[in-house]
Image (cartoon, rainbow, N blue to C red):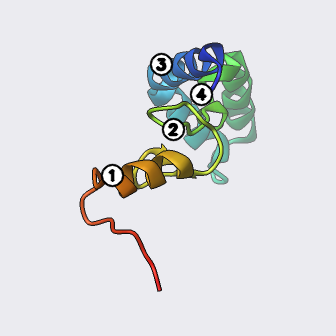
């Protein structure tokens, strides 16, 4: 089980990313546009710097939905490898069977 403070911090980051997503995307499009004027691109970069750091989508960490574990995360299921195995062995994940040969 991950520290509760780490999980809560990640949740706050997710909320900030959602809050600033439209503004961030608009400024990023202007800043990356090669055909735009150089001063406009610079102004967009400066405005992006004013947005809180935790509003950047790359700062959000994928974590297991049940344990909060950050490593060994499977996007398809939203679980870490350990929980995926436990739930798979109990038959709680449809279509997943234990492999043996």
61 relative to 77, above or below: above
Of label 4 and label 3, which has the lower sequence position? 4
Kindly indicate whether the residue at mark 3 contacts the one at mark 4 (C-beta within 8 angstroms).
no
Cα distance between the residues tagged 4 and 2: 10 Å
Q: Nearer the viewer, mark 4 or mark 3?
A: 4
User: Residue placed at 45% from the left, 29% from the top?
Assistant: 22
Q: Which mark is residue 64?
A: 2
Q: Which of marks 2 and 3 is in front?
A: 2
Specify few, some or many for label 2: CA neighbours under 10 Å numbering under 14, 14-19, or 20 or more: many
**Residue sitting at the far bottom:** 101
Cα distance between the residues tagged 4 and 1: 20 Å
Specify few, some or many for label 1: CA neighbours under 10 Å numbering under 14, 14-19, or 20 or more: few
User: Residue placed at 70% from the left, 21% from the top?
Assistant: 53
Judge by depth and name the residue closer to the eye, 9 or 50. 9
58 relative to 87, above or below: above
**To which residue does mark 3 refer?**
15
Q: Is mark 3 on a helix, strand or loop?
A: helix
**To which residue does mark 1 refer?**
90
**Residue sitting at the far left:** 94
**To which residue does mark 4 refer?**
1
Kindly indicate whether the residue at mark 3 contacts the one at mark 2 (C-beta within 8 angstroms).
no
Q: Which of marks 1 and 3 is in front?
A: 1
Judge by depth and name the residue closer to the eye, 41 or 81. 81
Specify few, some or many for label 3: CA neighbours under 10 Å numbering under 14, 14-19, or 20 or more: some
Of label 1 and label 3, which has the lower sequence position? 3
Kindly indicate whether the residue at mark 1 contacts the one at mark 2 (C-beta within 8 angstroms).
no
Cα distance between the residues tagged 1 and 3: 33 Å
Judge by depth and name the residue closer to the eye, 15 or 45. 15
């Amino acid at each position: 089980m991950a520290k509760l403070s780490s999980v809560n911090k990640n949740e706050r980051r997710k909320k900030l990313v959602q809050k600033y997503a439209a503004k961030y995307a608009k400024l990023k499009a202007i800043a990356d546009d090669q055909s735009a004027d150089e001063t406009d691109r610079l102004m967009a970069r400066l405005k992006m710097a004013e947005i809180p750091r935790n509003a950047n989508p790359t700062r959000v960490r994928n974590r297991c939905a049940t344990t909060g574990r950050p490593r060994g995360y499977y996007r398809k299921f939203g679980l870490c490898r350990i929980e995926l195995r436990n739930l798979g062995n109990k038959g709680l994940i449809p279509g997943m069977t234990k492999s043996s040969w």
